[in-house]
Amino acid sequence: MTPAEPSTGASSRGLTRRSLVLAALAGGAGVVGGYALAGRRAGAAAGAGPTVTTAERHAAQPEALFRIPTTEPIVALTFDDGPDPLYTPAVLDLLADRGMSATFFLVGANAAAEPELVRRILDGGHGIGNHTQDHRSLDTLTAQQVRVEIQQAHDALIAAGCPEPDLFRPPRGRTNAIVGTLADSYAYRTVFWDACVEHFVNHQPVAAGVEQMVSTIRPGSIILAHDGGRIVGSESAPLSRARTIEALPDLLDRLTERGLRVVDVATLLQATGTPALAV
Ligand SMILES: [Zn+2]
């Protein structure tokens, strides 16, 4: 799959933004490319900084999803950074026991290393999204590097047997307008989250964290958890996801008790009439 050509079918606003970025990709140090990248640096210098809050992410990618406004008793469950042989099998067993589906935002390098786990995820009826090839913070990269991170993961997922992915999540939620435009050019729907399991359970007793988290979840919420603790090829020390695995049974049971149906992102979009693609 190649990025859409900007010449037809785009709104004038989208056409302008996309043209700038694609010209930057094609031209490198060209005048237009220089403009787009200089604009990004100017934004950072003006205090735009890394996108670590929902408001900052929304400003960078206004079309991205954080939750779906709905009164339907339905929430999406998502897992990032897998597949990981230490944790992904336990998550899949847990979901199978409860008859639930989830979306797994896979790292391309991890998917290439664990094709059997990718197959298990697909066989379980779950969705798969692109979480880049190497899990780098995209707002620190050039447009060309971002494009390569998205493209390589796209190719790795397909090589591992996935259907063509149409959901994307920037690592650590770190993004900017260039990332948004590139994701759009691949017809990816960017999906962030409004509740993160590790945020609640990694810094206090797990039961208390689950209790607190459940009270924040509402219809249309998009829940983030992590089934991966390491990035293949990275020198960073692996992270333990033991607390996540400990929290999940209680969390999922509590959501069910509240009458909320736990599904993958595509099912949430379909149930709420949300377009699957951003472009
Ligand atoms: Zn991640």
Image (spheres, helix red, strand yellow):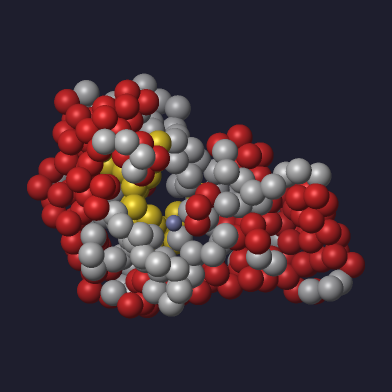
Q: Position of residue 37 (x, y in %)?
A: 79, 61
The answer to whether residue 91 is seen in the rendering is yes
**In this picture, residue 7 sits left or right of residue 249:** right
Question: Is 76 in front, or is 226?
Answer: 226
Q: Position of residue 91 (x, y in %)?
A: 21, 54
Residue 212 against residue 33 in the figure, above or below: above
Question: Is 153 in front, or is 267?
Answer: 153
Residue 52 against residue 120 in the figure, above or below: above
The residue positioned 61% from the left and 46% from the top of the image is: 51
Q: Position of residue 53 (x, y in %)?
A: 57, 38
The residue positioned 10% from the left and 47% from the top of the image is: 97
The residue positioned 50% from the left and 74% from the top of the image is: 152
Quadrant of res 30: bottom right
**In this picture, residue 248 sits left or right of residue 198:** left
Q: Position of residue 39 (x, y in %)?
A: 82, 54
Residue 156 against residue 216 in the figure, above or below: below
Quadrant of res 52: top right
* Quadrant in which ligand 1 is drawn: bottom left
